Each structure stands twice: as structure tokens, then as C-alpha cells.
Image (cartoon, helix red, strand yellow):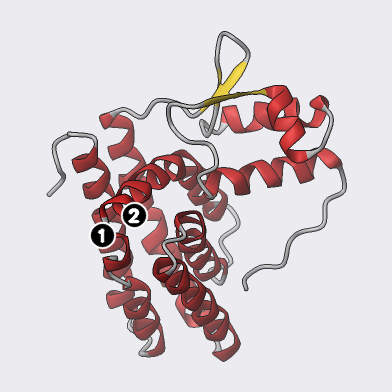
Amino acid sequence: MSNERPRFKTQQEAVYFELREAILRGKFQPGNSVTLRGVAEMLDVSLMPVRESLRRLTAERALQLLDNRRIAVPTMSETRLEEIYITRFTLESFAAEKAMPNIDAQAMEKLETINTLHNRAIADRDVENYIYLNFEFHRQLYSYSGLEVILPLIESLWLQIAPFMRMISNRFAEEGDFDESEDKHLEILEAIRKQNGTRLKHLIQDDILDGVRIQQEMMGWEVSN
């Protein structure tokens, strides 16, 4: 589908990867908390690698350790959400532009495959895979940029918003609007085929701006222009 699952030298690295993927799938939802032991049982590992991985994810502001030793998604503020999206707006459009010249026929096929699976998730009202495959499409696209510093920064921002995207997508699915989601990925793929960097950059920026507007509206905050 996209990048192959990495091989890990230690169990801690594997646990960290599994937890990151779980967050991107929206398995940790706002308002809910879990125990360290509960996470360890979910992954079928001991407490030690879970504890170390959660320290890293706490530093990335993807999760937080509560006073009662439970793990939860950090509360999202209006200012923090805006800051995350402003940063994404800049970094992701730059990564897409850098990636475009390096996308050959084989790379396009990978992107198209992910998009097909993403559309299938929409048709099936599969919220978890809808969220994850959207991230996976963009992760695959940006991977062709060769940017070693910026890509981890982008993923750290995704970790902070994924739980809230899952919450919003759940609501869309319940209200029957989920299958009406506009597929901007097709426009992105077309811009790449035409090697139109300006168009690609604007599509990425518009996609990000649409996302922040939806989250602001759902949370009752002032919607960005």
C-alpha cells in the first residue's frame, strides 16, 4: 500500500510505532483515558516498553499522563489548533512541492492504490480506515520529497489532531454526511500528473484549511477565513 512496515531493533521501538499508528487511527479519543496496564495488554507487551513509548508521545504532545496515572489525549485549545494548522499549511505544501518532481509511474500507482482504499473506506463508512488512509496518502506523497527534518515534524502534528479528526468523522458518519466527503485526492493526483506545482501547493493548503474550519465549527469556535 505505502511504505513497508519497518523492522525494529528493540521492542520499545516496535511499541512506539504501534502506539503512533493507533493514535493516527483515532483509537485514543478525546474525553477517554486508559491505564498503562490497559495499553500493555492491548499490545500484549510488558509495562516497560509502554512506559518509555508513552514518555516519547507525551513529549510530542500526542498524549498526556494524568494525575491518576492514566493516559489521555491532551485538551485542544482554539489557539493551539490554529497554531497546528498554520504550521501544517506551510510544511505540507512545501513537502508536496519538493516531492512532485520525484514521483514516477510506480510512485503514482502507490498513491492511486491508497486513494482507492480511502474511497472504499468512505463507501463502507469505515471511519478508522478513512482517517488512517487519509494520513497514509499524504505520508506517501511527502515521502518522495526526501526531507529528513520536516517529515517527522509533520507527523508529530498529525498525532496531535488525529483524535479530534476521528471524533468529527464519527459525527459525520452518524449524521449521514460521511459518504459525501469530497475526494480532493483525485485533484492532487491530477496536479502531479500535469507537474503543476502551484496547483498542487494550493490544493494541499485548501485541504488543510478545510480541515481546520470543520474542527473550529464543530467546537463552536470562530471559523478561519
Q: Quadrant of residue 80?
A: top left
Q: Is residue 199 left or right of residue 97?
A: left
The kind of residue on which mark 1 rests is Asp
Q: Position of residue 20 (x, y in %)?
A: 62, 44
Q: Quadrant of residue 207?
A: bottom left
Rendered view: 154 above or below 164: below
Give 197 or 167, whichever is nearer the viewer. Answer: 167
Query: Residue shown at 30%/46% (left/top)?
Result: 86
Whether residues under marks 1 and 2 lie with C-beta atoms below 8 angstroms apart, the answer is yes
Crowding near pointer 1: few (<14 within 10 Å), some, many (20+)? few
Q: Which residue is mark 2?
A: 173
Query: Residue shown at 40%/81% (left/top)?
Result: 189
Quarter of the image with the N terminus is bottom right
Query: Residue shown at 27%/43% (left/top)?
Result: 215
The kind of residue on which mark 2 rests is Ala
Q: CA distance from mark 1 to mark 2?
A: 6 Å
Q: Label for residue 177? A: 1
Q: Is residue 148 left or right of residue 51?
A: left
Q: Position of residue 192 (x, y in %)?
A: 40, 83
